Image (spheres, rainbow, N blue to C red):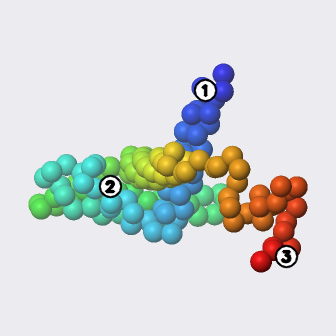
Amino acid sequence: MTRIVKPVVAVAVVAAVAGFVTLMVMVAYPGAFTWTAPVLCPADQPDPYVVRYTTQTRDGAGTNFTLFCMGDHGDFTEVGTWQPLGVLAAGVGAALLALVTALAVLAWLSRRHRPPDSPTGSPFDPLAASPAGAPIVDPPL
C-alpha cells in the first residue's frame, strides 16, 4: 500500500507546488504567457502578445490575460488563457521534478559512497579510547 501512496503523494505535491508557482509568476509578471509562444503559436504567426481585459462585475473589476499570436499581415490567433497557463505549469512541474530527482540521486549517492563505520569507533573518539567508555582526561605521557 505504501509503495503506491508515496509516489502518488509526491506527484500531487509537485503538481500543487507547480500550480502555486505558476500562479504567482502570472500575478507578478503576466508577460510570462509569451514564454509559451514557441509551443502554442502557429509557425506563420510567431509574434506573441498578451492582452489584458478588464471587465466590470457586481463585485468590482475582473482582469483577464489572454495570449494572441500575430502574423506578418495582421492575422492573429487567440490562444486564450488556459493553454498558456497549462504549458507554464507543465514547465514548472518538469523543472521541480528534475530538481527533486537530482536531489534524491545526490542523497542516494552520498549514502552509497560513505565509508562504513568501524566497529571499534574512531581512534580520535575520546569515548572509544577508554576501555570503560569514559573519556580520558589526562592521558599518560
Q: Are marks 3 and 2 in contact (CB under 8 Å)?
A: no
| Nearer to us in this view, 36 or 13 | 13
The disc, 1 or 3, on the residue closer to the chain's N-terminal end is 1
Asked where in the image residue 38 lies, by quadrant, the reply is bottom left
Q: Position of residue 33 (x, y in %)?
A: 37, 59
Q: Amino acid at mark 2?
A: Thr
Numbered mark located on residue 138 in the image: 3
Q: CA distance from mark 1 to mark 3?
A: 54 Å
Q: Residue at x 68, y 58 (%)?
A: 122
Quarter holding the N terminus? top right
Looking at the image, the residue that sits furthest to the front is 141
Q: Looking at the picture, does residue 32 appear above or below residue 42?
A: below
Q: Looking at the picture, does residue 100 appear above or below residue 129?
A: above
| Nearer to us in this view, 37 or 9 | 9
Q: Are marks 1 and 2 in contact (CB under 8 Å)?
A: no
The disc, 1 or 2, on the residue closer to the chain's N-terminal end is 1
